[in-house]
Image (tube, rainbow, N blue to C red):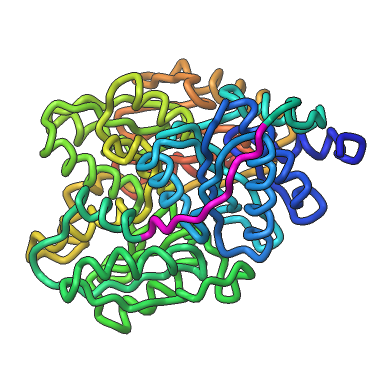
Amino acid sequence: MADTLDPQSVHAIFKAYDVRGTVPDQLDERLARATGQAFVDVVGATTVVVGHDMRPSSPGMAAAFAEGAAAAGADVIKIGLASTDQLYFASGHLGHPGAMFTASHNPAQYNGIKLCRSHAQPIGLDTGLAEIRDRVLSGAGPAEGTVRGTITEQDVLAAYADHLLTLAPVTGRPLKVVVDAGNGMAGHTAPAVFAGLGDLIEVVAMYFELDGTFPNHEANPIEAENLRDLQARVLAEGADVGLAFDGDADRCFLVDERGEAVSPSTLTALIAARELAKEPGATVIHNVITSRSVPEIVTELGGTPVRTRVGHSFIKARMAETDAIFGGEHSGHFYFRDFWRADSGMLAALHALAALAETDQTLSQLLAAYERYPLSGEINSEVADQAGVIAALEAEYAGLDQVTTDRLDGLSVTHPDWAFNVRPSNTEPLLRLNAEGKDLATMAAVRDEVLTKIRSN
């Protein structure tokens, strides 16, 4: 095995937080099996939970990973088709490390592996993933005398659904909800979850058929074009709310009754308010590109906002350090202390439905208090010298009146009337800009000004 694994290719697919690449040229069952064995060796697992999404290559690779893990001496519990947060539930509920085969929102030709320690603790390059990669490349077999583990199957879908409904019970008035699963794993989990709400929620299902070729649109709701079908259907149905999930259903985006997309920062502020009502004074995590409305609202409600870098490993680490009750990212990831600090798009959706069902307001009316500043959304620019452009921006803005800058993650520039963050991509020659302002004109002006500076270099 070792002499056929290309080190450059293996290094390319072991990313900061997971394994991800194209199938079968970068990622195949042979590499999945080697990763299963290496995972057990590095983590010291005696039992491993394995789940997979609906991509055509996922069942075979999950089975190969299970074989590798069993060969290394671990017992394997296969939970079958699952969303990523369902795998995190299994890891937390059963108390074992886990592996989820998914490429999330990536196109059909991709697949990947998300790994966690027991109780859904994250694994990244600096917390074990690099060691797993190096062990894969070594080609070492199981230690002599290793007793092969067992491989069994266990269905955890009903237990997962029950657990979410205990964390965010929905009561009050009936709601009509359009759910766009994007042919991804929400088509598997949503029926189980919403069945527990009986007649309270009328679900209008869109693209629930599990299909890893994504025949309708990419399962990436952060892109505006992938929300258009949902927005039109919400209006056509006269629905109260629309929910859009990504391919592995760990992210959720909302569409209000007007067919307008809701900023994930707004949903972060709403959920933060609900969690702070349960535990006054608690800590809430938000990253550097989340709207300033989030820390403002958390502070106004008596909570403690803590700012972090972008990325789930940073969010989860800060949650553990601060015992934060909740964390939100502008990318649509929402993290819950009561869910082993893991992210769950479905739990975020239930919080939104619970908040709406408790009032007689429309969703847009409910969210008005949490949506304070116009946002640009993330805008990418191809830049060869990322560090040079960021340094030039810092030099230009740092001396301005009432402006503060910091380098927590890329460059953040803050003024009382506006703010922006510019971050380099980890994998591409791109700079990512997020801007906001006290009103639409202010946001547009700072967005356009910074974009001109970035693209003129």
Q: Is residue 28 visible?
A: yes
Residue at 35% across, 35% down: 341
Q: Is residue 80 above or below residue 212?
A: above
Question: Does 395 lie within the magenta span?
Answer: no
Residue at 23% across, 66% down: 196
Q: Main secondary structure of the magenta part?
A: loop
In the picture, measured across the screen, residue 128 lies left or right of residue 270, that is: right
Q: Where residue 436 appears, x then y in whole percent?
A: 38, 41
Residue at 11% across, 30% down: 280
Residue situated furthest top in the rendering: 399
In the picture, measured across the screen, residue 313 lies left or right of residue 325, that is: right
Residue at 33% across, 66% down: 192
Question: Does 150 lie within the magenta span?
Answer: yes
Front-lying residue, 34 or 131: 34
Q: Which residues are magenta?
A: 147-157
Residue 91 picture quarter:
top left
In the picture, the quarter occupied by the N terminus is: top right
Front-lying residue, 136 or 424: 136
Q: Where residue 130 appears, x then y in whole percent?
A: 67, 26
Q: Is residue 103 above or below residue 136?
A: below
Q: Is residue 260 visible?
A: no
Q: Is residue 399 above or below residue 117?
A: above
Front-lying residue, 311 or 235: 311
